[in-house]
Image (cartoon, helix red, strand yellow):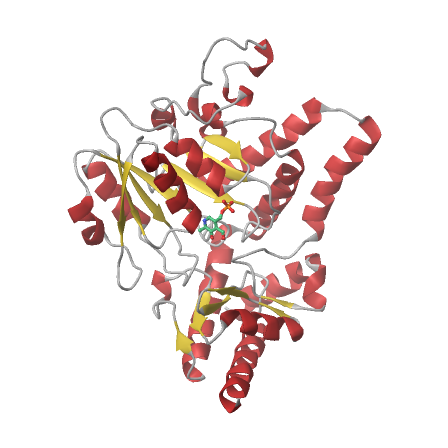
Amino acid sequence: MMKTKRSLLHEYRSLFPILEEKIHLGNCSQSPQSTPVLAAIDEYLSNWRSVGMDWDFWMEGVEQAKASFARLINADPSEVAVAGSVSDAASMIASAFPLGNQRHVVTTVDEFPTVGQVWNAHARRGWLDVDFVSAADRIYTPSVFEPHITSQTGVLSVHHVGYYNGAKQDLNELASLAHEHHALLFVDAYQSMGTCVIDVQKTPIDILVSGNLKYLLGMPGIAFLYVRKEVAERLEPAMTGWFGRQNPFHFDAKNLDYAASAGRFNTGTPPVLAAFAARGGMDLIFDVGLERIERRIDELSAYAVQGVQARGLDLASPEDITLKGANTAIRVSNAHDVEVFLMEKSIIASARGDVIRLAPHFFSTEAELDRALDAICERNGQHRAH
Ligand SMILES: Cc1ncc(COP(=O)(O)O)c(C=O)c1O
């Protein structure tokens, strides 16, 4: 075990220059910049500088990023479309409603708010109906959803790992539930991609969305949408564009057609710069290896939970690490002030509502978690003294 930890630390930490100065536990929000990602961005910038206009090179970069995302989840690249954000990707799917006679969506109150906003906006237009379900412990088992699913339910929309406290859902169970009811499983995997293995051949997710700036080590401006081939070809999104057509370069403005497979979910000119960064980040993830990352994150996750409990802090995440992702959330008074206090100590953590989130990645150390937890205790002590 020690060997694994050492190899991860020594081999990869130097690729993230900021780690020399800061403790970066904000990976649930934005991961640190790495030299391979910077080099990938520079490929685009120097081509733009020297060649001027090189669509073929840009499109190749976007295709490579798409292929890397497909490889991450064991899908075919033709099953992946490019979006600007998870919000865009979710809107594309909602804009394909109703699905035949199925116009009902079941989702949770613990989705990232943008997903709820998208379902609600399309409900207001009369394209679908949506039910929001809640689970006291934020763990969504089939029995929580079952009473809400009807023969009209077209989509069960669930996050994999919750943005608030890192609660991790069992996607195999949820895929079975959705399919028993002839519904599709839509997964927002933004908080888990890059931290654990997701294999859409083994776990029959129908639709999966994620962006790249969190654990996938990229930057804002791009997200990917996976749609299983058989599903994609049943869907006709109203949110569309020339890159979603059979041949974008036919320049036929009068007719509507859709590309095969998930290609139909592409919209306009793709986010080329962010695609280069995304590919650089995903290549680094492949280089380290997702199984290794998952093991290391589980070790750090267990360490963080024990550290919270040993210090008498208020754990908002599940105690059982099999039920949680990388993020360990701690309830504090005035989470935003805690984030600022930590930042003053060169510790990057992320506040959401009443919690401060410590989100390590494969390059993080136990000592860094200790420093962050001690600083939270110090802030708590000061707060009580006032
Ligand atoms: C689970 C999850 N989904 C979606 C988002 C937001 O996605 P976007 O800004 O790409 O629409 C976030 C951002 O924190 C998130 O954590």
Counting from the top left corner in percent of width and height, residue 180 is at 19, 38
Give residue 349's quadrant in the image.
bottom right
Tell me residue 200's x, y (percent): 38, 39
Q: Which residue is drawn at 46% across and 53% down?
A: 191
Answer above or below: position of 104 versus 13: above
x, y (%) of residue 146?
Answer: 18, 47
75 lies left or right of 155: right
Q: How many marks?
A: 0
Give the residue furthest to the front: 124
Query: Is any part of residue 200 visible from this angle?
Result: no
**Residue 108 pos. (x, y %):** 31, 51
Residue sitting nearer the eye, 180 or 201: 180
Q: Residue at x 54, y 56 (%)?
A: 29
Q: Residue at x 34, y 68 (%)?
A: 320
User: Which residue occupies the extreme bottom position in the image?
Assistant: 385
In this rendering, the answer to whether 133 lies above or below 40 is below
Which residue is at 55% across, 9% downward? 252
Residue 86 visible in the current orientation: yes
Vertical side of 303 occupied by 248: above or below: above
Looking at the rendering, which quadrant does residue 182 occupy?
top left
- Viewer-closest of 326 and 352: 352
